[in-house]
Image (cartoon, rainbow, N blue to C red):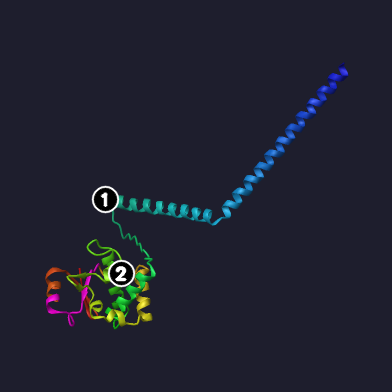
Amino acid sequence: MELMQKEGRFMFKRALAQLILCSMMIAVCWFSVKTLEVSRAAATPAFKRSLMVSRLEAQEDVRRESFGGEMGRAASGQRIVECHVLERTSIVMAQEEYDVLTRIVEAEAGNEDEKGRMLVAGVVLNRVNNKKFPDTVVDVVFQSENGTAQFSPVSNGRYYSVKVSEATVQAVDKVLAGEDVTEGALYFASRKHADPEKMQWFDNNLSKLFTYGGHEFFK
């Protein structure tokens, strides 16, 4: 009887040891699988983009705190040397919009230098972003009032006959990349070639900003 009890205790301990060993093996396997999943996730582009966004957000928070601190010191009477925040936004547009933009720039400023071409492209985009005008390049370029086109090359047909040059493409691309030299201009005109009554309307109803090349720019 005593021998059977000893054998029973031995079997129980052996089974318990096996159960503990199996549990440890399962735990090790689970940990290995989770580690592999995390490693794979970390290698994915989505995870890397997420990590980059987090880092950029952290840098932005630091910049904002720094900017806020400088503003606080300014309010307390301490002198601030300088603080600049520069933001540029690239513009992506459909091919049709791009073709219309480059063609009107060529028609209006094909004999101007790069800045002159950039100014015309910039005015068109300023109108697109202004609630007083249509919200697409195509609609802005072909807009008419009382049967009169807003851009003379559209009305006289020059728009349809020009061949867009590489210089115009480069100028337009610079504007689309974020370079704005217009000072907010919404109108331009060549006083030399414009109808006197039209120029009188410009002078009486708009604010002249500057003259560049063969055009005067207004807002």
Left or right, residue 42 beside residue 104: right
* The furthest residue to the top: 1
| Quadrant into which the N terminus falls | top right
Name the image quarter holding the C terminus: bottom left
Asked if marks 2 and 1 touch (Cβ < 8 Å), the reply is no
Which mark is first along the chain, 1 or 2?
1
Q: Could you tell whether 103 is left or right of 144 in the image? A: right
Q: Which residue is mark 1?
A: 75
The magenta span reads 184-198
SS category of the residue bearing label 2: helix
Q: Position of residue 205 (x, y in %)?
A: 13, 68
93 over 163 or under it: above or below: above
Q: Position of residue 212 (x, y in %)?
A: 24, 78
Q: Dominant secondary structure of the magenta stretch?
A: loop
| Residue at image location 36% in from the left, 69% down from the top | 176
Residue 197 highlighted magenta (yes or no): yes
Q: Quick one: 64 or 109, which is closer to the camera? A: 109
Q: Is residue 45 visible?
A: yes
Which element is circle 1 on? helix
Depth check, mark 2 against mark 1: the one in front is 2
In the rendered image, residue 169 lying in the magenta stretch gets the answer: no
Location of mark 2 (residue):
138
